[in-house]
Structures are given as structure tokens and as C-alpha cells.
Amino acid sequence: MLNVEVNARKRHGSRGHLSLLFGLTLMLAGPLAHAACIVENEEKVQINISPETKSWGDYRGQETIDGSRIVKCQEEAGRFLMLSLGAVQWGSSSEVKDSYIFNSFDPGTCSLENSRSISSYLPQVTKANFERQYKFLRSCIDLRVADTRGGALVVNEKQPFCDVTRIDNSAVLMRGSMCFIKIRAQNDYAVQPILKKECLDPSYLDAMGIEAQDIYANLDTLVTGDESGSSTDVRHVGSRPFHINITPKSGLLPLSEDFGAGIPRFTTTYTVDGDWGPVSIRSRQDRTQIDLSFLVSNIADRSCEGSSCSSSSNFMQPFVGQVELFRLRDAARPELIEEWWDGGLVPPNWQGVMNGISYRVPDRLFTPGGKYRLVATFQDPTDDYAIYLNGLKQMLVRLFDTEGATVGVDTLPAISTLGDLGIIPGINGMGGLHSNNQTVSLAQTMEGLEGIIASTVWPPYYDRACAGSESCMRMGKRKFHQRLILEFTADMDPSGGDVELANVRMQKNSPVFKSYPMQSGDFPILRCER
């Protein structure tokens, strides 16, 4: 196996933790590495599968997945291309996700601390979700690799971690954790993901235990010194994200409106339970930065009809609300000093700390010894998310007015999470936002963001929020489904710096999820051992 996977075993007790491989390849791909082998056409793969109608397609209804090209590999002749389709899973924080090329995800030893609302940590649900993803990818996705000019492909057809089927002299089908192709100077490669027709059959999916759900994956392309799988001579040259949505059959879960063949439908039951996570505040004479986080749980009851099962929590859901910052005053009403929308996207069947945006104000908001209140109100997941995206759009507009401006992940960290979406249309430019050393055109990002805002497909209009099958509320019948309140005293140096939150008190109100009264205590956290 790859040496890097031995390192992965130390951390997770398993092999195949591809992010560690990337760490190695980034070191190898410094200024002295050759700039050979380029992966082109790396747009995100977004497809919807409807087992009920035994149909599939991209979000325009077309039954095809565009291929990627791997070109200009002349300097790498004699080495090997390695193709790996890995299932993606998030860690204990929404900012950390990894691609696993083997069925090796282990949630680790984690403990839920200080939460008065989310009562239990359920790693077995997260692990089962990952295993369904992984089984689908290995059972249902082939990679058709061909030379674009009809030249011969040199491929070992007996590989330990890859099933290889020869189509003809210039093309093969490959499926597995690590698939290798010898690089010849005259080859240009096309790599096209192929969905097996059997995976449209609900009985086939049921037999494998694959449920209607969101599936996330990465197709990674690397150059290695040999095809042993244990070479340390590796370089990462491209990554292509996948989002596959398997729609529940009618009657299994309540679904959004049917817009016709090829257009995905999503569950309209909202299941994200939230609590405060750690809050970080920095204050300077001319700027304040507030970083909120929320402890969230997207785990709901499963519904079954015959041998088919699914859950509303099998799908990514937004957790976004209006945040208001008040200054508390003796014998006077609290003074509203700032408001914004904050939150993010919660992965399927996942519990952890979801980080919000870095909200920045060109002013100093906090004074030493001042008392403050933060109120986060979660009213309608769909409308709140639309307002949140419009806020991000306005941030881009302000940057767009700056001549020659570009935006990277360090400038707008919240926007990088939008690359996880699988909705119409795909958001352009997200690949650059995921890399700290790259920038992306503001105009291109703006276009994609406007497409998300205009989408009528995702998020769906949720008609109810549920904390278990016996505890539900209709959206719109109450002013909110959750409200979080935080009060504190600003303990800080008069010259500015980090604001220490003293005398912290928290409260949660909800007509459906577990509430708790105002009380002192530490911030909730999911703490995991490394």
C-alpha cells in the first residue's frame, strides 16, 4: 500500500485516507516539480437517479456525464496515472472533509460535551451513511479511459485494487480504489465516469442496502513512480467532485414538487437540530470580526416501505438564521448594533461543529466591560438561506467594485462551502476557492451564486420541522423553529485584540427541538481524539 496510508492508519486505524496523500503530493509539487500532466474539463459531476422511474440524468435530464481530459504528460513518460474515486466524509468540523479511497472511515472516539439540547452522539449513523456511499461508488460507477487519438493504452489488466476490462486497444473500463495506467509520451487521455444501468433498479439498490440519499465523492488523478500502490513518488494533478442524488420513491418521504423528468426532488421535512458552538471575536480600532459556530445534528428517524428505506437526514440541509447583536444597558432597552445572516450547510447524517462566515465590520463594536447579547433566529430554512446567499452576493459586489480584485478562500471562506451543493446550475469557479493559493474571477463566482439564488430546486420549501417522528411542527405556524440566545461580558485589553467572553450564559427556545432556559456554562462541543 501507499506509505502515506500507513500514516493514515496511525490516525484513523485504517488505510486510504487520501487527504494525507495530498499533503505529501503538495510537498512534492513545489517549485522544483515538473509542471506536466494537466487535467482539463474538471466541472463537477451532478446527476440525479430516480429508482422509481428507473431513470437518471444530469440536472437538465441528459443521460451523460462529460469526460475529463488528461494531457501534456510527455515529461511523465514511463510513470503511471493513478485514478481514485473516493467517498467524501466530513470530520467533527464542517471545515474538514476527506476523500477515502477504501472503506476505511472511522468516526473515532468522540464525546459530546456541554450541550443542553443535542442529547446524544450517534457515530454509527454517520458510519453507515459513509458505507452506503462507498458501496454505491464501487458497485455503480465505472471509469472509461481512452486515448483521444486512438493510440494504444498500456494497462496491467490484473491489478490488486482495480478491476480492468479491456474494450479495445485504446480503451478500458476501470473500477476500484487505485487504478493505474502507464504513461506514454504519445497518449492523451479521456476519463469518463459511466453509471451502470443496474443501479437504476430499486431492487438492485435495496439488495445492496443503498438508500435514497445524497452521495459525495472525489475523482482524483495522481502521477506515481510505479503501479505498486506503495510508491512515495506521487503528485496530485487533479480532482473532480461528484454529487449524486438518489430520489426517494413517492410515499416513502414527503417530497418537493415534481418538475419533470431529470429534475431532482428532495425531502421537505427539516431535521437539523442546533445549539451554540464556540464564538470568537477580534476587535481593533477600525475593525471587528465575529466568528460564530453552531453544534448541529442532522440525524432523523428512518422510514421504510417494503425493503426500501430512507431518511430526511440522508440529505444535506441548510442551517442558517438571522443573527442580531445587542448592547445591554442598565434601565434601558437593549440597543441593536449589528445584524446579519449566518450559518452554513449540514452534511447528511452528520453531527459536529458547523462554522459560519467571518462577519467583519469596519468599526469597533465592543468596549471593555460592556455587556452584550447575541440572538440567532432560525425561521424558514429556504428563505433564510436565500437571504444569506444574497448577503454573500453583496460582499462580492463590494469586491467587484475594486479594480482587478480577485477572491480566494481566505477572503470569503463562507463561499467555498457552496461547492458542496448539487443543485441547478453548478456554481462555477469553486475549485479555485477550495485552494488557498488560487484565486477565481469574481464575475464567474457571481454568476454561479446568482444561479443558486434563482434555483427553485434546492433547498426545497420545507413544510415541517421534526425532532423524531412524534415531534413535528408545520413551517409558518410559529415565528421560528429554533432561537439561540447568548449573553456575555466583553473582557479585553483597552487597546483591542481578542475579546474574551466572560460571564457567558446561553438559552435555546424551540417549539419542536429540545429547549433549555438561560443558564451559565461552557460552549457545547464535539470533542474527538486523534
Image (spheres, rainbow, N blue to C red):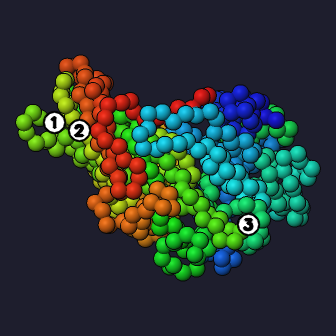
Q: Amino acid type of disc 2? A: Arg
Q: Quadrant of residue 450?
A: bottom left
Residue count near mark 2 (Cα–Cα under 10 Å), binned few <14, some 14–19, many ≥20: many
Instruction: Tell me which numbered mark, 1 or 2, is placed earlier along the sequence.
Output: 1
Position of residue 231 measured from the top left corner of the image (x, y, whole percent):
80, 33
Image point 61% across, 28% down: which residue?
530
> Along the line of sight, which residue is nearer the eye, 308 or 165?
308
Image point 31% across, 57% down: which residue?
480
Left or right, 98 with respect to 494, comes to right
Residue on which disc 1 sits? 328
Q: State the mark number for residue 407.
A: none
> Along the line of sight, which residue is nearer the eye, 265 or 25?
265
Tell me the SS state at disc 3: helix
> Where is the N terminus found, in terms of image quarters?
top right
Which residue is at the far right? 158
Residue on which disc 3 sits? 206
Instruction: Tell me which numbered mark, 1 or 3, is placed earlier along the sequence.
Output: 3
Q: Are marks 1 and 2 in contact (CB under 8 Å)?
A: yes
Image point 63% across, 39% down: which residue?
107
Tell me the SS state at disc 2: strand
Q: CA distance from mark 1 to mark 2?
A: 7 Å
Q: Amino acid type of disc 3? A: Asp
> Along the line of sight, which residue is nearer the eye, 201 or 377?
377
